[in-house]
Amino acid sequence: MRVGYSIADIAIWPLYGRVATGDVYGVEEFLDTTSYKNVLAWAKRIEEREAVKMSAS
């Protein structure tokens, strides 16, 4: 499995990545996003990218 950063990551992180980490909408409890360990790990990896940090500020 290749681990990297793709156009799919760029496209979905602003929506589901931020929902999963609790940054937007406040629905992480309703959706039980903490049970999706791999999705949370992915979202946190994307969130730590320098370009993402710059765009969020």
Image (spheres, helix red, strand yellow):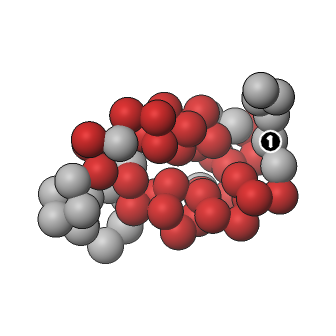
In the picture, residue 55 is in which quadrant? bottom right
Position above or below: 19 against 39: below
User: Which residue does the image show at 77% across and 26% down from the upper left?
Assistant: 1
Q: Position of residue 23 (x, y in %)?
A: 38, 58
Amino acid found under the numbered disc labelled 1:
Tyr
Q: Position of residue 43 (x, y in %)?
A: 52, 43
Position above or below: 40 against 55: above
Q: Quadrant of the C terminus?
A: bottom right
**Nearer to the camera, 33 or 46:** 33
In this rendering, would 53 be left or right of 18?
right
User: Which residue does the image show at 80% across and 41% down from the upper left?
Assistant: 5
Residue 15 visible, this orientation: yes
Circle 1: element type: loop
In this rendering, would 46 be left or right of 41?
right
Q: Which residue is mark 1?
A: 5
In this rendering, would 35 be left or right of 14?
left
User: Which residue does the image show at 38% across and 49% down from the upper left?
Assistant: 21
In this rendering, would 32 be left or right of 56?
left
Q: Residue furthest bottom?
A: 25
| Circle 1 crowding by C-alpha within 10 Å: few under 14, some 14–19, many from 20 | few
